[in-house]
Amino acid sequence: MKRKDLLSAQDLSLEDLQHYLDLAGRIEAIPPVDRRGLLPGKILATLFYEPSTRTRLSFDSAMHRLGGSVLGFSGHEATSVSKGETIRDTVRTVENYADIIVIRHPREGSARIAAEAARVPVINAGDGANQHPTQTLLDLYTILKFLGRLSDLRIALVGDLKYSRTVHSLFRALHLFGNVEFVLVSPPSLALPDYLKSPDHRFYETHELEGALGTCDIVYMTRIQRERFPDAVDYEKVKDAYRLEASMLEGARPGCRVLHPLPRVNEIAPDVDSTPHSGYFEQVAYGVTVRQAILLHHLGVWA
């Protein structure tokens, strides 16, 4: 697989996805102390025009643990972006300082604009409500670690299915593995967009969360994202549409895991953390492993 950039899950074939997962397995098998010499002298630039905790820090951690270094910004207020500098000009500047760029931006399509301008690899860390391919890869890897498979499963996608870029990417990617059934749980106003569905997808839609819990291998919760709503009144109508509590999981399948791209607000109660179904903090940990694999691949160290 030869690709300079990682911009969208839609760009990835089943073979591509499996390749990234195999690389993540390879890096996980290497003792942490032995990973430190894999990217000596390499520099990662993180251009985060939008707030982030896990994605930005996990990329930082991944690069440092491989022996590289990191520069960049989180929030553009103290940069030339606040003066009106375009994405293209920012990227053309930063590529002189770094070997690879990770970008997050609130506008859809911004990562492709950056990649078109850059001579170094560009990784999309989220562009608006569009795509978040590195989250998709770590979600797939997490499911694989928990269940041992990515086919023959039933997954509930819950909450904001309209604006959630993590859901959009995961829905498309999991379908490629075959025999995956989706239970789409959302308020009517936040249903998965029709353009993402095809006759080949196996899914059904419901507004009821509790009825779906007993039949699923994975329950993928999402936050109702205030920042994606053009109208604050519409957000207030649905902000607390779903709340998963430990008691609701009493009838869940023994191996069922609850995942969440985080941050959570009210949609998962703290008492779920201590149940055997909680999987979202392990999901965070796998993010470092997967992003190490991505950096190694796109910097040409691992083919």
Image (tube, rainbow, N blue to C red):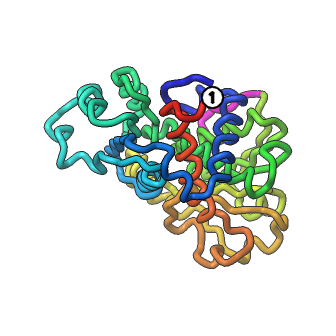
Label 1 sits on residue: 12
**Residue 34 left/right relative to 112:** right
Q: Is residue 130 above or below residue 146?
A: above
Q: Is residue 90 above or below residue 59?
A: above
Magenta stretch prevailing secondary structure: loop
Residue drawn at point x = 52 percent, y = 30 percent = 300
Q: Is residue 283 visible?
A: yes
Q: Is residue 195 above or below residue 212?
A: above
Residue drawn at point x = 30 percent, y = 50 percent = 74
Q: Nearer the viewer, residue 256 or 299?
A: 299
**Residue 111 left/right relative to 294:** left
Location of residue 246 in the rendering, given as x and y in whole percent from the top left corner: 69, 75
Please tell me whether residue 122 belongs to the stretch shown in magenta: no
**Residue 74 left/right relative to 202:** left
Q: Is residue 191 visible?
A: no
Q: Look at label 1 and name its amino acid.
A: Leu
Q: Magenta residues?
A: 191-199
Position of the N terminus by quadrant: top right
Location of residue 18 in the rendering, given as x and y in whole percent from the top left corner: 71, 36
Location of residue 92 in the rendering, given as x and y in whole percent from the top left corner: 27, 26
Q: Nearer the viewer, residue 286 or 236?
A: 286
Residue drawn at point x = 73 percent, y = 55 percent = 145
